[in-house]
Amino acid sequence: MNRRYLGKDAATDVLAFRQVEPEPGQEGFLGDIAISSDKAVQNAKEYGTSFDEETALYVIHGILHLTGHEDRTKKGQVRMRKEEDRLFQKIRKV
C-alpha cells in the first residue's frame, strides 16, 4: 500500500487516508486507517511492547493524521509524538 499510494518502496506500519468530501449520510467520517499487523508484530519485538500496544499506537497515529496532524517536518514529528504519548497514556488507563 505504501508503494501504491505514496510511491515509497518500503513497508510502513500505518497509513491514513483522509476523506476529502464526506459522502451523503457520512457526516463525521474522517477517513480510513490501514494498519500493518506484520509491522506491529515486528515492532513489538523490537521495542519490547505488546502487539496490542503497537496497534493502539498506530490507531492513534492514524487518527491524528485524519484530524490534520502532519509529521513531515522535525517540528511536526515532535508535536505529533507528544500528542501520541498524551493520548496513549489516556487509553492505557482504560
Image: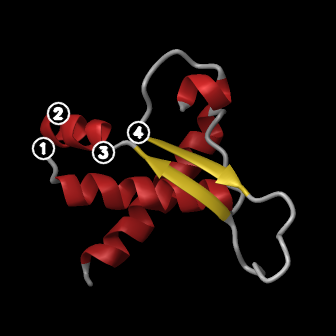
Query: Residue visible at 66% across and 33% down?
Result: 73
Q: Is residue 25 above or below residue 55?
A: below
Specify which label sits upstream in the sequence, 4 or 3: 4
- The answer to the question of whether label 1 and label 4 lie on touching residues, with beta carbons closer than 8 A, is no
Q: Which residue is mark 4?
A: 13
Which residue is tagged 2? 46
**For marks 4 and 2 on the same chain, the one whose residue lies earlier in the sequence:** 4
Using the numbered discs, state the Cα–Cα distance from disc 3 to disc 1 in whole angstroms.
16 Å
Q: Say which element carries label 2.
A: helix
Q: CA distance from mark 1 to mark 4?
A: 16 Å
Q: Amino acid at mark 2?
A: Glu
- Compare marks 1 and 4 and give the one earlier in the sequence: 4
Quarter the C terminus occupies: bottom left
Whichever of callouts 3 and 2 sits on the residue coming sooner in the sequence is: 3
Residue 63: x percent and y percent? 56, 62
Question: Badges 3 and 2: C-beta atoms under 8 Å apart?
Answer: no
Q: Nearer the viewer, residue 25 or 74?
A: 25
Mark 4: few/some/many CA within 10 Å (<14, 14-19, 20+): some
Label number found at residue 48: 1
Front: mark 4 or 3: 3
